[in-house]
Amino acid sequence: MISTLPDANPPTEKKTEKHKSRRRIAREFVLQGIYQWRTAGGTTSFIEQQLRESDKFRYVDEKHFTHVLQGALQQVDELEKVIRPCLDRSLDELSPVEFAILLLSTFELLHHPEIPYRAILNEAIELARTYGGSDGHKYVNGVLDKLAVQLRSSEIQIQKATKNRV
């Protein structure tokens, strides 16, 4: 059946894409690298080299990308031990996208205290909305909320105290 209703988004109207920061783009590439490692294997250096060949890599915060990708993949076992108690299922049951987001976000929570935990959580949720399953962002949010309480408790306490004064 052919619809006679006018197209709500005619092709002549371009939707404007939100500007992405260099760090957000770096996280997207890290997500892709961890996803590739999880599903197809390969060395960190090979995966990093492949990702760097992308035309869009020129927009990446290269320092953050390299540090998070290499760090997360070198510390997989340690990061999994931190993540595991916050899950309601085994790591093997997570989708590769959820796994990758949790791994990179946990690495950032542990090794990048200069990045506010809220920023890390918000970025992870956005990645899950964009690349994950329909409710993956809710699951990622729940796990990272638990992790933030464990890994950034002093930051959370300071934020709550400041908020209560206002």
Image: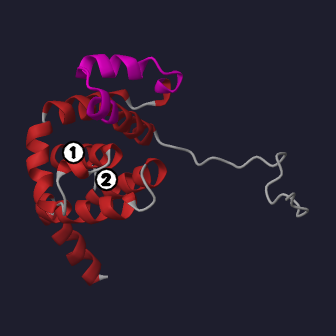
Magenta stretch, residue numbers: 34-57
Any part of residue 136 in sight: yes
Q: Residue at x 12, y 35 (%)?
A: 75
12 relative position to 80: left or right: right
Say which residue label 2 marks.
120
Alpha-carbon span between mark 1 and mark 2:
10 Å
151 relative position to 37: left or right: left
Query: Magenta stretch: dominant SS?
Result: helix
- Callout 2: SS: helix
Any part of residue 114 in sight: no
50 relative position to 3: left or right: left
Mark earlier in primary sequence (1, 2): 1
Viewer-proximal residue among 35 and 30: 35
Magenta stretch containing residue 103, yes or no?
no
Magenta stretch containing residue 35, yes or no?
yes
Q: Quadrant of the N terminus?
A: bottom right
Say which residue label 1 marks.
112
